[in-house]
Image (cartoon, helix red, strand yellow):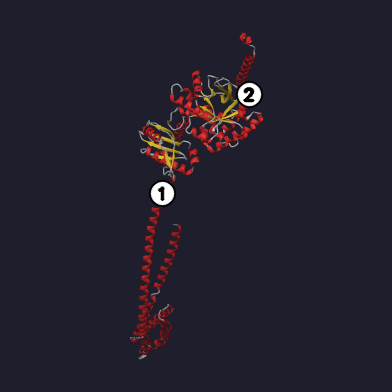
Amino acid sequence: MTALLAVFAVAVSLLAAAYQQRIDEASRYNRTFDAAQTLAELLRLQLAFAGAREPDDIDEIRMRAAILENRIGVVGNAVWPIPEMRADFLPSLADALRQVTPLIDHMPEAGVGMDAVTILKPLVQPLARMTSRSHAIANDEIGRTQAQLRLLFAVLCGLTVFLVLFGAALVTFVLWQNRRLDRTARSDALTGLANRLQFGFSLDRLASANGCAVMLIDVDHFKTLNDTNGHDIGDAVLTRVGQRLDQAAPDALLVARVGGDEFAILYEGAEAAARSRAAATRILEMMRQPIMANGRCVKVSVTLGFRTVERTGDRHTSHTLLKDADLALYEAKAAGRRCATEFQPEMKKSFLERHRLEADLHGAIDRGEHHLQFQPVVDLRSKTTLGFEALLRWNHPEFGFVPPSQFVPLAEESDLILDLGRWVLTEAIAAARHWPGDVFVAVNISARQLNDADLAIFVAKTLAEAGFPARRLEIEVTETALIQNEALATQTLQALRALGCRIALDDFGTGYASLSYLQRFVFDKLKIDRSFVESCREDKNSSAIVAAVCALAHRLQLGVVAEGIETQEHCAFVAEAGCGAGQGYLFDRPLSRDKALERLLREAEEAQWLVQADRAPRHLVLAL
């Protein structure tokens, strides 16, 4: 536009200069008038000489002669298109005027006037002819100039019309482009849904509405899906998820993608709460069907959290609505994902408590608030202790005992789990080095720890400093930990196994791909989750699963440990199913470091007493 305006300004300037030049040239057409006036004055001078009768007529003749002389000067200064006008005629006319001028003094003598007329008369016809020619030439030139001026005016009009039309087109284009850029700025390039910017604008307006709902949807374990299947599959999954959300919420005000794997849905109106709940049910139902992404069948699940406002008198800011929906989403994830959770006021209290716990978790080790307890793993036949599982405990100075289910996820969300996990390994090995025989200690390793490339190096260094055999350290991992980053988890487990550590798969049977993990990873032991043991008598499926797992472990030459044994019935059941070891409250509750050592020493004394009793004479045994 700037370039066009510059060109237009230059063009207008040039056209104005040309127009001015045409006007200047048109002003020169006055030379024809000057020639005609000169002819008229020549004729008047002749008539004055011819009609002079009285002495008073001499003044008239003198005046006419002076006027003619002046006209000769004016005509002589003009530019003539007739060359002979200035070269021949004007000198002749001036010479004739000089000849008749002395005759004026002799007027009105007889014959003087006729002599003057005779001198001037030959010049009349040539001057008249030249005047006529000049007039014709001037008319032609004026015609050409007028034609050029008309053309110039037409060009100016055409250029003006063009610029007006171009300006209108430019304004239309700018408006269209602005709308297009606005749509682009407010749309997600991958899914075509609204983006975070549009979501924010709509939420700001929606927050003051009477009746609304804000729903946040998160794709479960999307990073793992993306890393495992590739970014092209991940992008296709996000696109299909967006399409399903749009189909499941056709009555929503807005469906948006607000993050990498996070979507949002907005509802407004008096029925917003009911419609959002119905949409949540439809979304969960639709997401049960696998997604076809680039020819691959991918199973995807989502977790939902939403905040509804039903009372017309309530007023909320967009920030509080979004924060409340995010709290509900957090609660849904904590509940196991694949579900929808609606915000409740008490969630804020638990959220603040979590933040307080997370803040207090920093430095808890240095303050001595953490300690380990050891739960025995018992041989189901001899009832002797094979080892202990190290369990982390936190005694908060204000809240008292904080369950691991509350603070371990907080530690996993940050890098605190790395320091905490290393502290557990160090303390567990330090305690176990005093245990007799081959009693092992089992330590749980989280997903974040498995992603630590230096974990195996740290374990090797700790074992060497404590002088503790690697074969007595058992590393327990869950399927959830393995799925986070399978490639790095494989490397870490292989490095730990190369040290001599044993690897156990914890909570076996509760995941989604247990058998496939038995193929890809090398384990030494399977731990059957307590949920199967607790329902062994009521649920035939649970008992069948326990028996199948034991049979599978024996075929794969793996050890089996049943968790959650609390009654003699549980113990008899798992032993009958083929399980060789177990742990639970039936055998003992988690023990302190000293109590664990006392248990082992007590078992050692009992075993020694039995050996001595076997070696004693029969009559002594009877006496005893």
What label sits on residue 437 in the rendered view? 2
Where does residue 445 sit, x and y in percent of width and height? 56, 31
**Which image quarter is the N terminus in?**
bottom left
Q: Against 443, is 154 above or below?
A: below
| 26 to the left or right of 414 | left
Three-letter residue code for mark 2: Gly
- The one nearer the camera, 427 or 512, is 512
**Which image quarter is the C terminus in?**
top right
- The one nearer the camera, 551 or 61, is 551
Three-letter residue code for mark 1: Arg
Q: Residue furthest front?
A: 618
Where does residue 9 sit, x and y in percent of width and height? 44, 61
Q: Within 10 Å of the Cα at label 1, are there few (<14), some (14-19), or many (20+) other Cα atoms?
A: few
- Label 1 or label 2, whichever lies nearer to me, is 2
Give the quadrant of residue 160.
bottom left
Where does residue 63 sit, x and y in percent of width and height? 38, 81
- The one nearer the camera, 512 or 315, is 512
The residue labelled by disc 1 is: 180
Tell me the element at label 2.
loop
Q: Distance between the residues labelled 1 and 2?
A: 76 Å
